[in-house]
Amino acid sequence: MKIICIGRNYAAHIEELKNETPGNPVVFLKPDTALLKNGAAFFYPDFSKNIHHEAELVLKISKEGKYIQKQFAHRYFEEIGLGIDFTARDLQDQCKAKGLPWEIAKGFNGSAPIGDFLPVSEFKDMKDIDFHLTINGETRQKGNTSMMLFDFGTIIEYVSQFFTLKKGDLIYTGTPAGVGPVKIGDHLEGYIGTQKMLDFEVK
């Protein structure tokens, strides 16, 4: 399976990182070794001193498809979950400054914690899904799919031009404002609505 990630999909997050607003979804990949499942602890890596949390809704692809038209995109996922796109911000900044790819800042081991999934039947409106992240009981990020620059259908239509989507693939759909550093000892909990989806510690 593969992990497809969408960057710069919430205007306030673009503003906080002083990035340009994209005309199309910004796409990058993480390897399957980035996945962190079942509430396993995230071990802070030696190569970074500035790991940031980015909470995101995650689509689980349910069947194979490519060149998917937006109006049919809903047929290709049956579950929505919550995950974290951990980013080694210091490494990313160094790579960007040199005009280099920054996969090492995004795809390192454990950089994609993933929680539980809910069936799409539990959601009344794909464009009105609330989610939030707390750290040590304090809310750090809050988002709603209405705030996305590119909705689920647009994302699937766009990425499926380049990558054949296969059952089990995950699409991380972008993070709202409020990203920031984590430290050893932090306790992260992620919610869709009021339902806890993700719960793990940084060690």
Image (cartoon, rainbow, N blue to C red):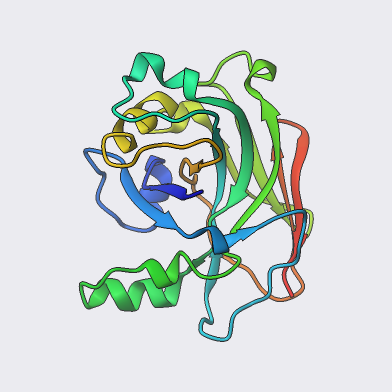
Residue at (40, 24) in percent of width and height: 153
Q: Nearer the viewer, residue 24 or 35?
A: 35
Q: Give percent across and percent down for residue 24.
A: 25, 38
Count of marks overlaid on the render: 0
Q: Give percent across and percent down for residue 42.
A: 69, 68
Residue at (56, 64) in percent of width and height: 33
Q: Give percent across and percent down for residue 141.
A: 60, 48
Quadrant in the rendering for residue 195? top right
Q: Give percent across and percent down for residue 9.
A: 39, 41
Residue at (40, 55) in percent of width and height: 29
Q: Nearer the viewer, residue 14 or 64?
A: 64
Q: Nearer the viewer, residue 81 or 192?
A: 81
Residue 150 in view here: no
Q: Quadrant of the C terminus?
A: bottom right
- 128 vs 39: above or below: above
Residue 185 in view here: yes
Q: Is residue 66 left or right of residue 46?
A: left
Q: Is residue 72 left or right of residue 40?
A: left
- 195 vs 184: above or below: above
- 181 vs 55: above or below: below
